[in-house]
Amino acid sequence: MEVDKEETQNQQQKHQQQVHLFYCVESEELARKVAGYSDLITLQSINWRNFDDGFPNLFINNAEDLRGQHVAFLACFSSPGVIFEQLSVIYALPRLFVASFTLVLPFFPTGSFERMEEEGDVATAFTMARILSNIPISRGGPTSLVIYDIHALQERFYFGDQVLPLFVTGIPLLKQRLLQLPESDKIAVAFPDDGAWKRFHKLLDHFPMVVCVKVREGDDRIVRIKEGNPAGCHVVIVDDLVQSGGTLIECQKVLAAHGAAKVSAYVTHGVFPKRSWERFAHKNEGGMENAFAYFWITDSCPHTVKAITNKRPFEVLSLAGSIADVLLI
């Protein structure tokens, strides 16, 4: 659900500077929603073209009018193929003598590749952080970098002093949606592992909680309930992102086996490579694909949002209001 527009209006009263918001092609729909929250956010455009050899041929429209203005860019690093052209714009905008520059990157895509388990592993989360840390400073100082529910909080230390990272969460959107459900007093929250519990439990501490854990049995890793009782509850599994969805499905099975009345899921980032969202889509009555009552994601991954539109059990909780609030700080 969207952040309360009255709160956004209060922010506007404190902030009288216009924000010029640029966006990549994938993020156009989200950018328009963000601009819809405030007259102080003006959409600007970029000509995204390519030369015959495939390399970007880019043009920032109205560049001279940006001098002394507050500028932001809404990025989407959905694949390696689009990152270079967006970085080219991201590096160019602060150099246009702007008053400040904010980069909104809702999903930090290499966040789950932050560890080295053996010599030779490449922690690409650190690589991406270094690239973003070298964005040129603007007239007003370092770039503000806004990221939602980065995979590991310690990744904040991967960024250098030339950027000011702001880590935001989508959990308030989930809480707002849960309060709208019938029998909201029977909702419990489950975490698929200790990492998710450490990350989110303080934001959801007024709900009963269930913590799952993966244990090894022979060559298999089995999901078990570590603590909490899901019996009779509508249990919502909470995590930062989903890829194949295998862990969520195993959690659903064990929660249902222990008496959960219904099971739903929330992730901030619905990555779903290779259309893996299809294994959750409601198809035939009574099938395993109907195991989830609701599956909430945000619009941090635009390709997924387009794919799951009007497909049960999916619902999109838009980040637009939250992003507007951040831009108006």
Image (cartoon, rainbow, N blue to C red):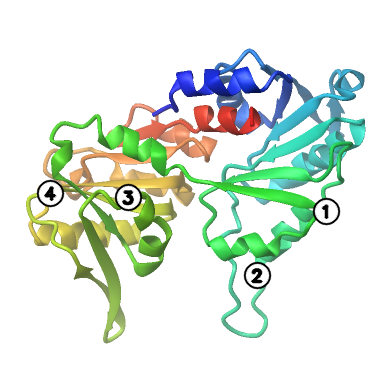
Label 1: which secondary element: loop
Q: Which label was assigned to residue 267?
A: none
Residue type beneath disc 2: Ala
Label 4: which secondary element: loop
Q: How many C-alpha atoms fall within 10 Å of the one at disc 1: few (<14), some, or many (≥20)?
A: some
Look at 71% across and 25% down and name the residue there: 21
Determine the image quadrant of residue 64: top right
Q: Which label was assigned to residue 123?
A: 2
Would you say 37 lies left or right of 212 here?
Answer: right
Whichever of callouts 3 and 2 sits on the residue coming sooner in the sequence is 2
Q: How many C-alpha atoms fall within 10 Å of the one at disc 2: few (<14), some, or many (≥20)?
A: some
Look at 35% across and 62% down and name the residue there: 197
Whichever of callouts 1 and 3 sits on the residue coming sooner in the sequence is 1
Label 4–label 2 contact, CB within 8 A: no
Residue type beneath disc 3: Leu
**246, above or below 121, in the image:** above
Q: CA distance from mark 4 to mark 2?
A: 39 Å
Q: CA distance from mark 2 to mark 1?
A: 18 Å
Residue type beneath disc 1: Asn
Q: Which residue is mark 1?
A: 134
Q: Nearer the viewer, residue 12 or 136?
A: 12
**279, above or below 128, in the image:** above
Determine the image quadrant of residue 70: top right
Whichever of callouts 4 and 3 sits on the residue coming sooner in the sequence is 3
Whether residue 132 is visible to the viewer of this picture, yes or no, is yes
Residue type beneath disc 4: Cys
Q: Position of residue 246 (x, y in %)?
A: 33, 60
Q: Which residue is mark 3?
A: 204
Between marks 4 and 2 in the image, the one whose residue lies nearer the viewer: 4
